Amino acid sequence: QVQLVESGGGLVQAGGSLRLSCAASGRTFSSYAMGWFRQAPGKERKIVATINSSGSITYYADDSVKGRFAISRDNAKNTVYLQMNSVKPEDTAVYYCAARYGAFAAVERNLYDYWGQGTQVTVSS
């Protein structure tokens, strides 16, 4: 069993930065690939970025976040991060982290085993 707790969300002005954190319980965090998803009001939850279990491979879902967001992890601290720079109003959403057992991440929501409760990010223009 893995419990995930996100933090770091809040209200930020366009062009600003936020760093989201997702702390995982348990001693097997390094056995899980991780993903960050986001869900805007009235829209489906979508993948933002993924990272494999060792942290050596990252993936960003689309061009809108490439170069602005960075996913990373610290397996010694059981934590995965999402650094968000140059944020835009369209980044407003609830951000969720998710854990998938195994070395390799996935983009499909249904392939993740555990989810956090989400953290709200609101970007004002």
Image: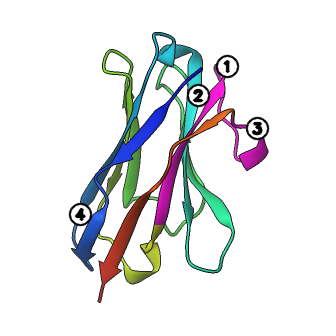
Q: Are marks 1 and 2 in contact (CB under 8 Å)?
A: yes
Q: In which quadrant is the C terminus drawn?
A: bottom left
The residues bearing labels 4 and 3 have C-alpha atoms spaced at a distance of 29 Å
Image position of 65 with respect to 77: above or below = below
Which numbered dot is residue 33? 2
Q: Nearer the viewer, residue 57 or 23?
A: 23
Q: Which residue in the structure is indicated by mark 3?
A: 111
Q: Which residue in the structure is indicated by mark 4?
A: 17
- The residue shown at (40%, 64%) is 120
Residue 34 in picture, x, y percent from top left: 55, 34
Q: Quadrant of residue 14?
A: bottom left
Kind of residue indicated by mark 3: Leu
Dot 4 or dot 3: first in sequence order is: 4
Kind of residue indicated by mark 1: Gly
Kind of residue indicated by mark 2: Ala
Question: Is residue 45 found inside the magenta-colored segment of the image?
Answer: no
The residues bearing labels 1 and 4 have C-alpha atoms spaced at a distance of 31 Å
Which numbered dot is residue 85? none
The residues bearing labels 2 and 3 have C-alpha atoms spaced at a distance of 11 Å
Q: In which quadrant is the N terminus drawn?
A: top right
Determine whether the residue tagged by mark 4 lies in a helix, strand or loop: loop
Label 2 CA crowd tier, 10 Å (few <14, some 14–19, many 20+): many
Kind of residue indicated by mark 4: Ser
The residues bearing labels 2 and 4 have C-alpha atoms spaced at a distance of 25 Å
Residue 58 in picture, x, y percent from top left: 52, 38
Magenta residues, as a range? Answer: 94-112
Residue 78 in picture, x, y percent from top left: 38, 22
The residues bearing labels 1 and 2 have C-alpha atoms spaced at a distance of 6 Å
Label 1 CA crowd tier, 10 Å (few <14, some 14–19, many 20+): few
